[in-house]
Image (cartoon, rainbow, N blue to C red):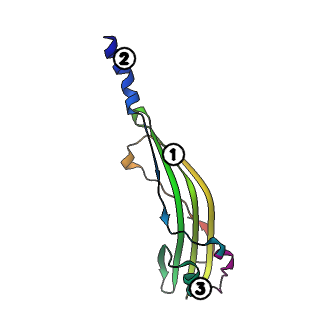
Amino acid sequence: MKLKLFTIALAPLLLWGCATSTATTGSDFISAVVPHIKRGVTTSSQLLRWLGEPYSKEPVSANTVLWLYTWVRPTANMAVVPFGHRNIGTSGYMKTLWLVIKDDVVVNYTYEEGLYERHTRVTSPPETLLLQSSLYRPDTQGNATNK
């Protein structure tokens, strides 16, 4: 009887767990180039020579394209506690350069670099979890916005 109660008391502890994962997204790029980027002067050819191909290119209009250079090295930690709660922490280092290219010339850009940390407590099943990163990126009219 005591063994049965002891087993029942310890059962929730068996549901406790931790996991850690590290990955890299994008390609590292030389951030020393960023101060040399000039609005209305720097061309897409110069960017390609300095930084290589961007991580993504998103057409905005017939003559405007949004380029993204990004490199992120996050470490994700997840702790599962009894009764379905999950504590998720992500920290790491990131570099993100958004450029608005119009007629092959930079008209606007934003750059962000540094350490970051995010924590989330989730009580729903993991398949319903959707984490979105808020990146500071320029709009296509030349105004900086947080999207």
Residue 138, can we see it? Answer: no
Circle 1 — which element?
A: strand
| Disc nearer the start of the sequence (1/2) | 2
Disc 1 target residue: 120
User: Is residue 39 located in the magenta-colored stretch of the structure?
Assistant: yes
- Are the residues flagged by discs 3 and 1 in contact, CB closer than 8 Å? no
- What's the amino acid at mark 3? Gln
Residue 141, can we see it? Answer: yes
Secondary structure mostly taken by the magenta-highlighted segment of the chain: loop
Which residue is found at the position 52% from the left and 55% from the top? 74
| Disc nearer the start of the sequence (3/1) | 3
Circle 2 — which element?
A: helix
> In the picture, residue 103 is in which quadrant?
bottom right
Q: Which mark is residue 46?
A: 3
Cα distance in 3D space between marks 1 and 2: 33 Å
- Are the residues flagged by discs 2 and 3 in contact, CB closer than 8 Å? no
Highlighted magenta segment, given as a residue range: 33-43
- What's the amino acid at mark 1? Thr
Q: Tell which of 136 and 3 is nearer to you.
A: 3
Residues packed near mark 1 inside 10 Å, few (<14), some (14 to 19) or many (20 plus): few
49 w.r.t. 109: above or below = below
Cα distance in 3D space between marks 2 and 3: 69 Å
- What's the amino acid at mark 2? Phe
Residues packed near mark 2 inside 10 Å, few (<14), some (14 to 19) or many (20 plus): few
113 w.r.t. 58: above or below = above
Residues packed near mark 3 inside 10 Å, few (<14), some (14 to 19) or many (20 plus): some
